[in-house]
Amino acid sequence: MNEITLDVKIAKTTIDRNIYGHFSEHLGRCIYEGFWVGEESPIPNVRGIRKDVVAALRKIKVPVLRWPGGCFADEYHWMDGIGPRAQRPTMINTHWGGVVENNHFGTHEFMELCDQLGCEPYICGNVGSGTVQEMSQWVEYVTFDGKSPMTDLRKANGQDDPWKLKYFGVGNENWGCGGRMRPEYYADLYRRYGLYARDYGENRLYRIACGARNDDYHWTEVMMEMAGSDKLLGGPYMDGLALHYYTSVKRLPDGSREGSATDFDEAGWIEIIAKAHVMDELVRKHGTIMDKYDPEKKVAMIVDEWGTWYAVEPGTHPRFLYQQNTMRDAIVAALTLDIFNNHADRVRMANIAQTVNVLQAMILTDQEKMLLTPSYHVFEMYAAHQDATQVPIDVQSDHYEHAGYRVPAISASASVGDDGRLHLTLSNANPNKDLSVMVFVRGLKASTIEGRVLRGDSMNAHNTFAQPDAVNPAPFTGATLTHDGLNLTMPKMSVVALDVM
Ligand code: AHR
C-alpha cells in the first residue's frame, strides 16, 4: 500500500533554488568541447561558449555553477587563466589524464558563461597547492571596486567593473586530492585562508569549507567545532560546509569505478538505487552533528558533488569520466532531489557532477551534436520546486526487493509556489510493477491536476546521438482527483511531476 500524506498549511521552509545547482570541472570534455569551443569554432557560439548547451541549460534554470574543480581546483593557479589567450601559459592537468591545459577558459570566460546561463558563479579556490596570497588576490581581482594592483590588472584585461561573486569554496576534498590533510590541520587552514578571502565593497562572500567524504563524521565534527560553531568568537567562520557522495558499484584503488552505465541487470539496477538512498542517512547524520554546534542552522550543508559514477564508456579516455545516462540515473536524480527537498532546512545547495560529458551529466556532446540525458529531464521536471516552500510529506511506500537489496519503491517531495500551486514529484524505482499511490492532501482543495512522466521501456533506456528522444517527458494521465486528494498509478521505473491547483 503506497500512501502519501501532506499538509500545505504547515509549509514553511524555502527550497533553496541552489539545490538544483551544477558542477563543471576542467576534466575530460566538460569545459573544453562541452562549454568552450572558442570564438573561431564552426560550432555556433557566443564569445566562444556553445549556444546549444547554454540554451538547453537555461531551460532547466541552472541556479549556480561550481568551477574550476573538483580536484583540479587545488592545482589551478588562476593567474594562468587571465590575459590574452595566446599568451596564457599551459599546464599539465595531472589529476585528469595528464593532458595539456591551455588555460583558454579562465576567470573571465567562467563569469561570461554564468552570465549567459543567468546563474550565480561558485568559485572553488586552491588551498592544496596555492598560497593564501594567491587566493586572496583572486577574490580581490574579481570583486574589488577600488584602485589596487589587482583591479588595475582586471581592467587591463577588459573588465572594468568588479563582478558579483557570492559563493566561494576554500579548497576541495582537502582530505584527499586537495592535500591529504587531517581535519584538524585543514580546519586551521580554512580559518586562515577564509579570513584573507575578503569582502570588498558591497560584495559579501558566502564561504564554503571543504566537508566530509561519505560518512566521515569525524571530519564534520572537527570542522564544526573549529570553524562552524556559533560559540567561536565572531563565529561561525563559514556559511556552508560541503559534503561529497557519489553513487557507484565499487571504487577501485586508482579511483576509477566498476560497472557499466548501460549494460546492467536488475541486480545492478537496485544496487545503484539502494546506494543512492544512502544520501538520506548521510544528510541526517552529518546534520545531527551540525545541529550540535549550530542549532540555529546558520551553516548550510552544501552537497557540492553528488551523482552516479560508473566505468567510462568503452574506448574513451579512462580519466575523462565520460559515461552514458539511463532511466536508472533518472531515478537516482529524482530520489536524491526528493531527499534534498525534504531536508531543505539544512541542505541549501547541491551540485550534481558534472554538467556536460562527465559523470551524471545533463548533456552529452559529440562535435556539433548534443543530446539531453534522462537526468536532464528530471532536473527540468523538478524545476518548479526552486524557491518554492517545502510541504512536509509522509511517504509510506511498498518495498521493492531484489538480490538482497530492499528499498522503498516510491520517493516523493512536495512544495507550494507563491501562486498556491502544489508541486508534487515522485519516482517509482520498481522496474517490474506499476504502483497505485493514494495522496491525501490537506490544506488545499484540489480541482485540477497537470502532470508529466518520464519513463523508459527498459531499465537501461537512454538517449543516443542517433536516437536523442528515446527518453523524453510525456503528458501524465495516470492521476485522478478524489474527495481528499488524488490517486495515481505510477508506471514502473518512472518519474512523475504534478502541478495541483
Ligand atoms: O567529480 C570528479 C571528482 O570527484 C572531483 O574532481 C573530486 O572532487 C571528486 O573526487
Image (spheres, rainbow, N blue to C red):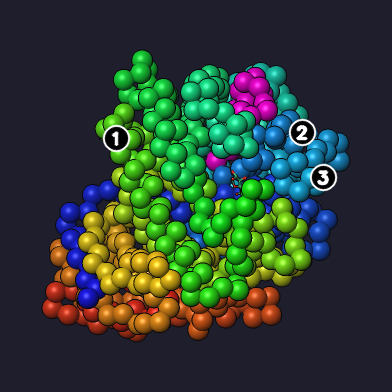
- Some atom of ligand 1 lies within 8 Å of the CB belonging to the residue at label 2: no
Whether residue 471 is visible here, answered yes or no, is: no
Q: Nearer the viewer, residue 406 or 108?
A: 406
Name the image quarter holding the N terminus: bottom left
Query: How many residues crowd around disc 1 within 10 Å: few (fewer than 14), some, or many (20 or more)?
Result: some
Q: Position of residue 390 (x, y in %)?
A: 28, 54
Where 282 sits versus 168, above or below?
below
Residue at left 79%, top 53%? 39
Mark 1 vs mark 2, foreground winner is 1
Q: Which mark is residue 80?
A: 2
Position of 214 with respect to 12 (left or right) is right
Residue 109, relative to residue 437: is it above or below? above
Q: Can you identify the residue that label 3 sits on?
A: 100
Is residue 131 covered in magenta?
Answer: yes
Q: Tell me the tag on residue 473.
A: none
Asked if the stretch drawn in magenta spans residue 186, the answer is no
Task: Give residue 230's position: percent from left, percent from top.
Answer: 32, 24
At label 3, the amino acid type is: Val
Q: Which residue shows up at 51% across the image and 69% down it?
A: 268
Above or below for 75 versus 450 = above
Sequence order check: which comes first, mark 3 or mark 2? 2
Q: In the rendered image, which residue does mark 1 sit on?
A: 291
